[in-house]
Amino acid sequence: MNTLNENERIIMKENLYRNEIYEAMMTIFKMFGNASRLKIMTILSKQPCSVNDLTDILGMSQSAVSQHLHKLREANLVKFEKVGLNIFYSLMDDHVMTIFEQALDHVVEECNDFHENN
């Protein structure tokens, strides 16, 4: 493998995104750094749920679930829809589903490889 020449370095530099893009990506990845939020996303990847549903499924307090949902909404990872008096949360879009599923597939594969080799 060779080091990049000057022209290749210039091209690589030009292909970098603005810092704001990387900051936004960091925010998204930080949301994946909490097991409770990952569990919420697992549930919402299957179907929309209310805070009460999530509270019951996860065995968490309503305020804790609400705080996690608030953070996920701020990161544009989940959205909500009001239906009558109920509010249902779901993943924002297919991009979020893809990121989540890709990370999950990677981890499951790595865990299976680890167990097979030990």
Image (cartoon, rainbow, N blue to C red):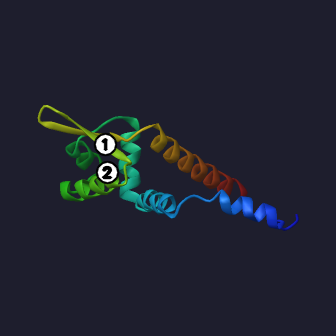
Task: Tell whether 114 sits left or right of 46.
Answer: right
Instruction: Indicate the position of residue 65 as horizontal and vertical percent values.
Output: 25, 54
**Residue 79: image tag:** 1
**Residue 40: image tag:** none
- Residue visible at 47% across and 63% down? 23
Label 1–label 2 contact, CB within 8 A: yes
Residue where numbered disc 2 is placed: 73
- Residue visible at 11% across and 36% down? 85
Kindly state the secondary structure of the residue where label 2 is placed. helix
Q: Quarter of the image holding residue 83?
A: top left
Task: Tell whether 68 sits left or right of 46.
Answer: left
Q: Earlier in the sequence, mark 1 or mark 2?
A: 2
Residue lying furthest left in this view? 85
Kindly state the secondary structure of the residue where label 1 is placed. strand
Q: How many marks?
A: 2
* Mark 2: amino acid: Arg
Front-lying residue, 64 or 90: 90
Q: Quadrant of the C terminus?
A: bottom right
Instruction: Indicate the position of residue 108 as horizontal and vertical percent values.
Output: 58, 50
